[in-house]
Image (cartoon, rainbow, N blue to C red):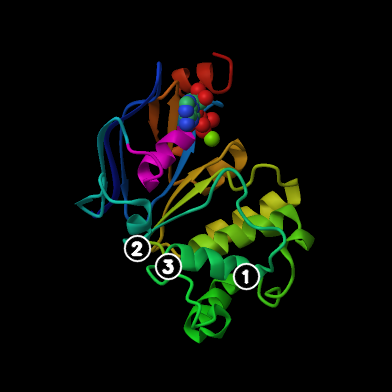
Amino acid sequence: MTIAIEVDNVSKQFAGLRAVDSVSLSIPQGERRVLLGPNGAGKTTLFHCISGTHQPTSGRIVMFGKDISNVSENARTALGMGRTFQISNVCTDLTVMENLLLGMLGTTSQKWSMFRPVTSDKELIGKAVASLERVGLQGRENEEVKYLSYGERRQLELALALSSNPRVLLLDEPCAGLSPSERTHFSKLVSGLSREITLLMIEHDIDVALALADKVTVLHRGRLIFDGLPDEVQKNADVKEVYFGRL
Ligand SMILES: Nc1ncnc2c1ncn2[C@@H]1O[C@H](COP(=O)(O)OP(=O)(O)O)[C@@H](O)[C@H]1O
Ligand SMILES: [Mg+2]
């Protein structure tokens, strides 16, 4: 069994707060893992440690057997890690295509060039069009993002994360703030993704989470308190107490 992501005894300390506390987990290639936990549990901080936004205070991150703890965020993208953010990060004054091209250039070694307008880069545009198709936004290239619904913006962010052809995809609460029908639509998109992509997703909506997850990990106050099957999570006494607020 190939392990896509291994989090090895990772801690992240912010001044007096240990936001992530000695967390170890291991995600086999192709698995869909959902990370649950109350607000402030350390989920986003753990994501930032995996993606390279944060340097863990201690511990290691290993991707497909390679220790990437000291690898930069952009280099992790080049190695096959894609992600979306909890806070929407699209530019609303730009078009769908401009957002994608800007994001795609930001993560490649090819930067803006005064002598080669990006809008004439056929290969890049081809990749952008393909990732728009993967999320159902084909034909929307020239629309300004401010006219897109919130759900469509999330689809665009997913397209951006997919544009680098990630082997590992991290999604931080992609359904937050969406209407129930947008949520259903978005979770269908995620379940339709290729099984070649190993997925680690933070999701607050327990129904969405349990429907998508092969396995579930629960954090509480920075510590891992449960790691197991979706069927077992709601029966687990520790999880019931801290996550569902009852015993
Ligand atoms: N950059 C930071 N500096 C200081 N404290 C932080 C920072 N980021 C997160 N925290 C704190 O770490 C804890 C975990 O936050 P976070 O990882 O965002 O939780 P979650 O995503 O599970 O809601 C919270 O108490 C939060 O206030
Ligand atoms: Mg968070």
Ligand 2 in which quarter: top right
Residue beneath label 2, please?
78
At which x and y percent is residue 95?
Answer: 69, 69
Residue behind label 2 places its C-beta within 8 angstroms of ligand 1: no
Q: Which residue is mark 1?
A: 98
- What crowding class fits label 3: few (fewer than 14 Cα within 10 Å), some (14-19), or many (20 or more)? some
Q: Residue at x 25, y 55 (%)?
A: 64
User: Which residue lies under the disc numbered 3?
Assistant: 165
Q: CA distance from mark 2 to mark 3?
A: 9 Å
Dominant secondary-structure state across the stretch colored magenta: helix
Residue drawn where x is 54% and y is 57% of the image: 191
Give the label, 1 or 3, closer to the camera: 1
| Nearer the camera: disc 1 or disc 2 | 1
Say whether disc 2 or disc 3 marks the residue closer to the N-terminus: 2
Q: Is residue 92 visible?
A: yes
Question: Of discs 2 and 3, which sits in the foreground?
Answer: 2
The answer to whether 67 appears left or right of 81 in the picture is: left
Query: Which amino acid does the dot numbered 2 rest on?
Result: Ala
Q: Which residues are magenta?
A: 43-55
